[in-house]
Image (cartoon, rainbow, N blue to C red):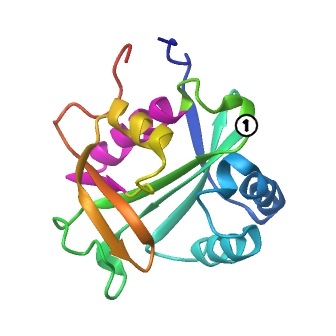
Amino acid sequence: MRAEPHGSYDFRPVAEADLPMISGWLAAPHVAEWWEDPETEIGHIREHMESISVEPLIVELDGRPIGYLQSYDPHLEDNHPYADQPFGTLGIDLSIGPAELVGIGHGSAIIRQFLQLLFDEGAPRVIIDPDPRNARAIRAYEKAGFRALGRRHSEYGDVLLMAVDVGSGGGPRNGS
């Protein structure tokens, strides 16, 4: 079993200057398999930069951008398919950009640290919705404390809705 990466991650808002870098990440095979085409996604991210319901962030490790993370409130969007979750629930999505950083523990470590921030801000539950075929992501989310709620099909496609509740063991921890 691989050791978790050490150190902490920084989260900062996406800036216009980040969009070409994110576009490059979205075009990489390990990311492109799970996201729409980069041009469409960059359009969404650009819209999110001005949104009250979605917060697009860059994940940095030692000052180096390594991922794209967004959090969203499903209760702030009309007819959101996850609006049935408890009030205050937030959703997240994560992609690690550089291929060499995939599969070595960054995903679950980033999520655990970000979960702690969301729980500290008062979120009672955090959800994530990977493609059911994305076994690597599902494993990383399980390591971060998420549990499967069940499969759903919506405008986002076929997903495995997963959740972690405050106080349930999600968030930072030592080891895996």
| Residue at horizontal 55 percent and vertical 16 percent from the top | 6
Majority secondary structure of magenta residues: helix
Q: Residues within 10 Å of mark 1 (few under 14, many from 20)?
A: few
Asked whether 116 falls inside the magenta stretch, the response is: yes
Magenta-tinted stretch: 107-128
Q: Is residue 57 visible?
A: yes
Asked whether 75 falls inside the magenta stretch, the response is: no
Snapshot quadrant of residue 151: bottom left
Does 127 sit above or below residue 11? Answer: below
Question: x%, y% of residue 40?
Answer: 69, 76
Name the residue beneath numbered marker 1: 99
| Residue at horizontal 66 percent and vertical 37 percent from the top | 60
Return the residue nearer the eye: 54 or 33.
Answer: 33
Does 81 sit above or below residue 163? Answer: below
Question: x%, y% of residue 70?
Answer: 52, 58
| Residue at horizontal 49 percent and vertical 38 percent from the top | 136
Question: x%, y% of residue 147?
Answer: 24, 43
Return the residue nearer the eye: 118 or 152.
Answer: 152
Snapshot quadrant of residue 157: bottom left
Question: x%, y% of residue 138?
Answer: 40, 42
Asked which secondary structure carries label 1, the reply is helix
**Quadrant for the C terminus in the image:** top left
Left or right of 82 on screen, residue 174: right
Left or right of 94 on screen, residue 115: left
Q: Is residue 63 visible?
A: no
Question: In the image, what residue type sits under mark 1?
Answer: Ala
Does 167 sit above or below residue 1? Answer: below
Does 63 sit above or below residue 175? Answer: below
**Residue extending farthest front:** 133
Q: In the rendered picture of this protein, how many numbered marks are placed on residues? A: 1
Left or right of 34 on screen, residue 15: right
| Residue at horizontal 45 percent and vertical 73 percent from the top | 156
